[in-house]
Amino acid sequence: MNKNFKKYSLEFLVIIFGILISFFLEERRQNSIEISKKNDSIKQLLKVIEEDLNQIDRFIFLQNFSLNSCNLIFENLKKNNIMSNDSIIYHLSSVGRGLRSFFPQEGVFNQLISSDLIKRIDSEDLKINLFKLFNEDLKRHEVHTKEYDVYFLDFNYKLSVNFFLEDEWSIGPDPIKVQSYRFNQKYYFSDSMYGDLIELKSSMISYIKELEELKKTYLSLQNLCNEELNVS
């Protein structure tokens, strides 16, 4: 009886131990899969960050290009029209081109949230900064972008109405092409033109600062993502 009890007890313990090992191994396997998925998402996020950083740099360049044109127009107005009409129209078109805005990619972040993989991220700083960027900074940026674009859309409409301006914009070595226009000297020297330029210059300066701050945030996230992958 005692021998049978010991035998069955040992067999029971072996079975229990086997079940526990099986659960442990399965948990480790699932954990490994989740970590691998999380790391894959972080790698995708790094690609998106790199693409968004390139986009931010392009728009900082574009805004500075338009801001320079705005300053040249101001100088020309102060010095009573020493530029040719072609140059004036080119730079007015350049100012109007400042309406184009940065649009971030949010798909990978939304995937991290919806799949709960964000819980697998070890770095609290990375999680906090991700939520701050996508739930605060970019939402605020979107609101500001729409506010800026209101001024630029109205300005471009005024250029079309007052100069019959037809132009094309692109991202390249020759970004602005003026197809046709009819110069309107009265409107060019009007208070309305001067007031619009003041408002647009202020918007461009503010937007450049905002883009530069956004760039710093992206670079910080880039470093945190790389640290997370190195830890994993």
Image (spheres, rainbow, N blue to C red):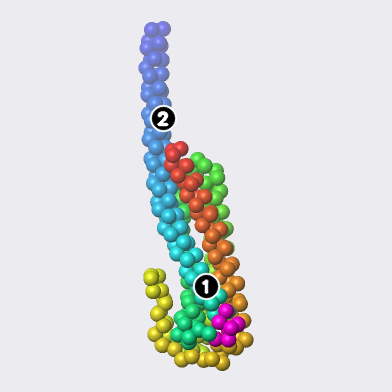
Query: How many labels were placed on the picture?
Result: 2
User: Between residues 42 and 187, which one lies in front from this camera angle?
Assistant: 187
Q: Can residue 41 be seen in this view?
A: no
Kindly identify which numbered label has been placed on residue 155.
none
Q: Where is residue 78 in the image (x, y as percent from the top left)?
A: 60, 82
Q: Position of residue 46 (x, y in %)?
A: 43, 51
Q: What residue type is labelled 2?
A: Phe
Q: Is residue 218 visible?
A: yes
Q: Position of residue 124 (x, y in %)?
A: 55, 43
Q: Is residue 80 magenta?
A: yes
Rendered position, 11 above or below 89: above
Instruction: Give the residue pinned by disc 1.
Output: 68
Residue drawn where x is 53% and y is 62% of the image: 211
Q: Earlier in the sequence, mark 2 or mark 1?
A: 2
> Is 123 placed left or right of 37 in the picture?
right
User: Between residues 27 and 57, which one lies in front from this camera angle?
Assistant: 57
User: Between residues 63 and 49, which one lies in front from this camera angle?
Assistant: 63
Q: Is residue 9 magenta?
A: no
Q: Position of residue 21 (x, y in %)?
A: 39, 26
Quadrant where the C terminus is found in the figure = top left
Span highlighted in magenta in the image = 75-81
Instruction: Give the residue pinned by disc 2.
Output: 24
Residue drawn where x is 48% and y is 86% of the image: 84
